[in-house]
Image (cartoon, rainbow, N blue to C red):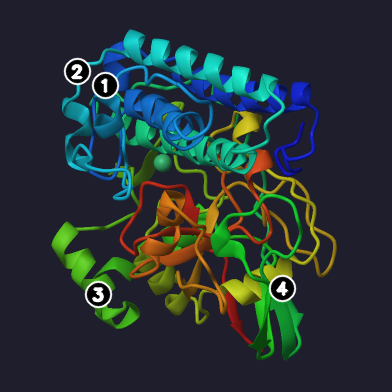
Amino acid sequence: MELQASLNGAPRDERARAYLAVRSATEALAAPLSAEDCTVQSMPDASPVKWHLAHTTWFFETFVLEPHPPGYRPFDPAFRVLFNSYYNAVGPKHPRPERGMLTRPGLERVLEYRAYVDEHVLNLLETSSTAGLQILELGLHHEQQHQELVLTDVKHLLSRNPEKPAYHPQWPLTEIQARKPRWIGFPAGIVEIGEEGTGFAFDNERPRHKAWLDAFEIASHPATHGDFIAFIEDGGYRRPELWLSAGWDAVCASGWQAPEYWQERDGRWFTFTLHGEAPVDPNTPICHVSFYEADAFARWKGARLPTEAEWETAVGGLAIEGNFMESGALHPLALREAPPEGALAQAFGDVWEWTRSDYAPYPGYAPAAGAVGEYNGKFMSGQYVLRGGSCATPQSHIRATYRNFFPPAARWQFSGVRLARNA
Ligand SMILES: [Fe+2]
């Protein structure tokens, strides 16, 4: 069953299949890793895989099992604190930067925790009660978000090893010729953005509402690594006039000279991938750039980042197709075929596209009731919206209205750039 459809109203067997498909996909992502790989935390923003495995389970235990079947006994009461991410209404939490200190419980115990909670969730589906089905569905979409984080966090972890170990040794990429982006124009007018259907969507995608757009143009596909090399060679990281003030501060403080994971040797750029180190392919979409780098690059190009209303309007009714987690590439791929005239290519998958829109509530936004109201709404300050999903996003997780968000200096996600400009 597609997760895009609602679990509510689906037959019990289909609900169970959808649940088990998502749960087993997470475990499949962890399968190539050792217990040591799963334990270490490489930076405060990234979490150990073991923590992701436990926290996604904690979500079902805390929000589905504890409120719903009478007499549910938690697997281990200590886990309520250890694997609480940020839900203040649930109670105290283990500090985020210290998730990598948790050598206990071990990986095996966390996998037992998963099996215990799975058994109880499946039993809950057995009963006729539909209470909690909506939150169960939220739990599945939550787990898919963590599947992407497993990949980005493991990539960051392995990149810190001087041996540059591969998560997956097979290199799936083939060289493909460069394609020049075309500008696609859209007229001024009132548009509607946001989710209005009855299917699953996060609260931050609603309500659907009107927005005014001036005439604009947007690139037919994302900017490439080759474009970004030209920016670097033109002194992009040494020219404060190209940068937002906070972006220039970030360049100076962190010494950025290239995107995350890049290294120059003998005049050639290499990058770290989930398949180990590889030469930078100039024809693949640029990724692992912060909002600040995306913005400076766009300014250097005489363009700008699109707003999220422009992005959603330009994408229109395009099918959700592209290079997602399931392709196994785990890296953005070059465009194989030129898109039809006037159509966007690579809108979904490959790289999350930074927008110029700060992550704010839509007009009329209301967070969900209860503790899960903390899921999205409380993060609506100081972050920017990214659209379209990446090569690490599960395909059934994404929608045209989907709003991802990260702080402007974040670089460890598969984040890239699609240029826009005023018409
Ligand atoms: Fe979470």
The percent coordinates of residue 205 (x first, y second) are 60, 63
165, above or below 106, in the image = below
Circles 3, 1 touching at the beta carbon (< 8 Å): no
Secondary structure beneath label 3: helix
Q: Which residue is drawn at 45% across and 69% down?
A: 359
* Residue topped by disc 2: 103
212, above or below 385, in the image = below
Sequence-first disc among 2 and 3? 2
Secondary structure beneath label 1: helix
Q: In which quarter of the image is residue 409?
A: bottom left
Q: Which of 349 and 19 is in front in this view?
A: 19
Q: What residue type is labelled 3?
A: Ala
Identify the disc placed on residue 246.
Answer: 3
Identify the disc placed on residue 39.
Answer: 1
Sequence-first disc among 3 and 1? 1
Circles 1, 2 touching at the beta carbon (< 8 Å): yes
Q: Distance between the residues labelled 1 and 2?
A: 7 Å
The residue positioned farthest toward the front in the image shown? 70
